[in-house]
Image: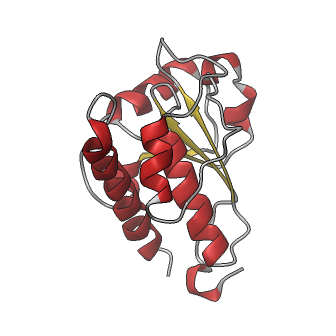
Amino acid sequence: MNQKYNRFPYRKILVVCSVNTARSPMSEGILRDFFSRNAMDVSVSSGGIASNARDGMLISLDAKLVMEEIGIYLSDDSVSVDLKKHPELMQKVDLILALTEKHKKEIYNHFKLENKAVFTLREFAGENGDIDDPSMKGPIGFRKARDEIEHCIVEGMKRFE
């Protein structure tokens, strides 16, 4: 465990967005990279909570490309997970990070959560607001979402130094 973040109490994180093809996979990639670079033993997964979430959808090509720009590679084998079909995933984690307030509310509406920390990514960073869906906004929209996600993770982790 990295001494710099020795106050970080979580070992298993789930990131939640609408359909798990853009924001949550980017968040998962940034978190995994952060924990790897800081020699922290924390597992990260992601899923979608919206009514149109499906198992097995491919990760957005734009998401993959803008992540590669910062040296983080999302696996070609990565596919979406519909959390409503996999409630057991919620029970295996101790921190849930939602990309929006709506996602956070949907999590509480669909799942019984006990002893789970649930925050929006902006709340984790000590801020307010959502990370907007970059779909249909091209590389510029995906870069904006990626950079906001990275900012929130860095700011949130500062609380555990």
Task: Look at the image and tell me whether residue 116 can be seen.
Answer: yes
Quarter of the figure with the N terminus: bottom right
The quarter of the picture where residue 84 lies is top right
x, y percentage for residue 141? 27, 42
Front residue of this view, candidates 151 and 123: 151
x, y percentage for residue 104? 43, 33
**Residue at coordinates 53% horizontally, 18% vertically from top-left?**
53
Task: Look at the image and tell me whether residue 123 can be seen.
Answer: no
**Residue at coordinates 62% horizontally, 80% vertically from top-left?**
6
x, y percentage for residue 52? 48, 12
The quarter of the picture where residue 92 lies is top right
Q: Is residue 25 above or below residue 36?
A: above
Horizontal relation, residue 55 to residue 105: left or right:
right
Horizontal relation, residue 8 to residue 19: left or right:
right
The quarter of the picture where residue 82 lies is top right
Q: Is residue 38 above or below residue 89?
A: below
**Residue at coordinates 51% horizontally, 32% vertically from top-left?**
21
Horizontal relation, residue 148 to residue 157: left or right:
left
Horizontal relation, residue 61 to residue 139: left or right:
right
Front residue of this view, candidates 100 and 78: 78
Q: Residue furthest top?
A: 51
**Residue at coordinates 74% horizontally, 68% vertically from top-left?**
41
Q: How many numbered marks have been drawn onto this rendered protein structure?
A: 0
Colouring chosen for the image of the structure: secondary structure
Q: Residue furthest bottom?
A: 3
